[in-house]
Image (spheres, grey):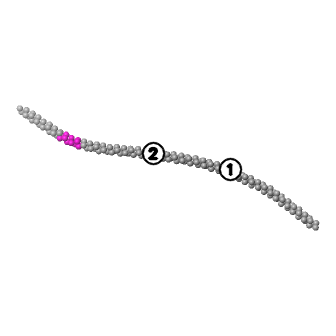
Amino acid sequence: HAKNIAALQAGHESQASVQERVKALEQLLGASANKHAQVVREIQQALREHQASLEEHNAHQEEHLSRSIGAQCKEMQDVKAMLAKQGADIDERLAQMEELVGDAAERHAQELETLRAAHIAHAREIEDAKTAHIRLAGEARQNLEQHLSVADRLETLENRLKVCFSEL
């Protein structure tokens, strides 16, 4: 029996030793689990803070973008209004130029018609002057011929009279 008791005591001792080891392991694991739980809580807290910071940043970005887009829209509306005004100015100036060109064209057409009428009248006057010149030149020739005939006749008469007086 002593052997059995010694074996039983050795089994008890080894069982105590296993229990102590399990207890030590549980303590280590418990401490490690507590540390891990604390780290997880810290990480979760940091994540919440980061998310809050990110949401705040996003809110600021949205506000900034909203103001920026509003300013850009206003600027684009101003540019659009300016371009519309310039377009109207260009349309007005073009209308004025067309009116001036139209007035000038009408005035030039009237002046051209007046010049054509004056040219036709002048051409008639020139034709009348040519006709008168031809008529007068013919009359002058006739008068010259008659004048020469008279001069010839006078010379003939003078010669005869000379002859007549010389015979006496």
Whether residue 60 is in magenta: the answer is no
Quadrant the C terminus occupies: top left
Q: Position of residue 102 (x, y in %)?
A: 39, 46
User: In the rendered image, which quarter is residue 99 located in?
Assistant: top left
Q: Is residue 111 above or below residue 19?
A: above
Q: Nearer the viewer, residue 150 or 22?
A: 22
Q: Which residue is mark 1?
A: 53
Q: Earlier in the sequence, mark 2 or mark 1?
A: 1
Q: Is disc 2 placed on a helix, strand or loop?
A: helix
CA neighbours of label 2 inside 10 A, class few (<14), some (14 to 19), many (20+): few
For residue 106, side relative to residue 90 (left or right): left
Dividing the picture into quadrants, the one containing residue 160 is: top left
Looking at the rendered structure, the kind of residue marked 2 is: Glu
As helix, strand or loop, the secondary structure at mark 1 comes to helix
Residue at the outermost right position: 2
Percent of width and height locating residue 26: 82, 59
Give the left or right position of residue 150, taking residue 90 as reference: left
Q: Nearer the viewer, residue 29 or 3?
A: 29
**Amino acid bearing label 1:** Ser
Q: Is residue 34 above or below residue 5?
A: above
Q: Is residue 136 magenta?
A: yes
Which residue is found at the position 85% from the left and 61% from the top?
19
Q: Which residue is mark 2?
A: 92
Residue 125: x and y in percent read 26, 42
Give how far apart the Cα atoms at labels 2 and 1 are: 57 Å
The magenta-colored residue range is 130-142
- Neighbours of disc 1 within 10 Å: few (<14), some (14-19), many (20+): few
Type of secondary structure dominating the magenta stretch:
helix
Measured as percent of width and height from the top left, residue 45 is found at 72, 52
The residue depicted at 64 percent of the width and 48 percent of the height is 60
Q: Residue at x 52, y 46 (%)?
A: 81
